Image (cartoon, rainbow, N blue to C red):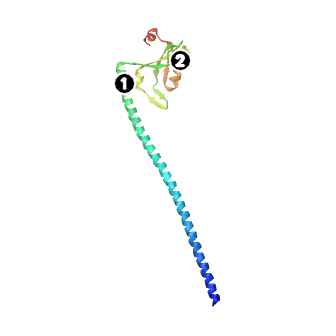
Amino acid sequence: MNTVLFVMGILSAIGAVSIALIRQILYYSRRAQITRITEQNRDLHRKQEELTKAYRDGQEAIRQGEVDRKAATTQLADAQRRLKLAKEDNYVVIHELGEASGSRRLFTVPMTLGSTLTLGQNVVKDSKFRAARHFVEIWADNADDANRIARTNFPPDSGFVLSKAVPAASSAIAAE
């Protein structure tokens, strides 16, 4: 009987130790799972904050775009109003380049606008500014320099048709 009790005692001890080990394993695995889920939660929270910031930045960009669009619409309406007045009054548009200094002289370059203009990345077809006369007034050392400056600022391949630079009349210089 002592042997049976001894075997039962050992089996009970093994069972108790096994239960304790299983309990510890479950405890640590749950703790690791909680730690992992907590870390995932932090990552998700950080991603949510980044997405919220991106959303707010996008909304601000949309609001700013709307403000810019309204400003551009207002400027366009003003330009159209001025263009209408210019067409009625047959204005001359003068584009000024450079500054008077030293030996520089004033040159005038007559300019016409082609049917298609490329301004930066925008293409404008049959602009109403074509009806107005355009002159480019350039302060330069000589006519070749004036022609170079004019063609740099108003490139012919963008739709600007430039004539040769000529010295401005002395009355135009006196008016400056």
Residue 83, given in percent of the width and then of the height, sits at 37, 24
Residue where numbered disc 1 is placed: 82
Task: Give the left or right position of residue 119, taking residue 90 as reference.
Answer: right
Outermost residue, bottom direction? 1
Residue 98, given in percent of the width and then of the height, sits at 50, 19
Q: Are marks 2 and 1 in contact (CB under 8 Å)?
A: no
Residue where numbered disc 2 is placed: 147
| Residue type, numbered disc 2 | Asn
Q: Secondary structure at mark 1?
A: helix
The total of numbered circles placed on residues is 2
Q: Which residue shows up at 37% across the image and 31% down it?
A: 74
Residue 5 in sight here? yes
Front residue of 115/90: it is 90
Residue 108, given in percent of the width and then of the height, sits at 48, 15
Q: Which residue shows up at 45% across the image and 29% down it?
A: 124
Front residue of 97/85: it is 97
Q: Considering only vertical position in the picture, is 125 above or below 17?
A: above
Task: Give the left or right position of residue 10, taking residue 38 as reference.
Answer: right
| Residue type, numbered disc 1 | Arg
Q: Quadrant of the N terminus?
A: bottom right
Q: Residues within 10 Å of mark 1 (few under 14, many from 20)?
A: few
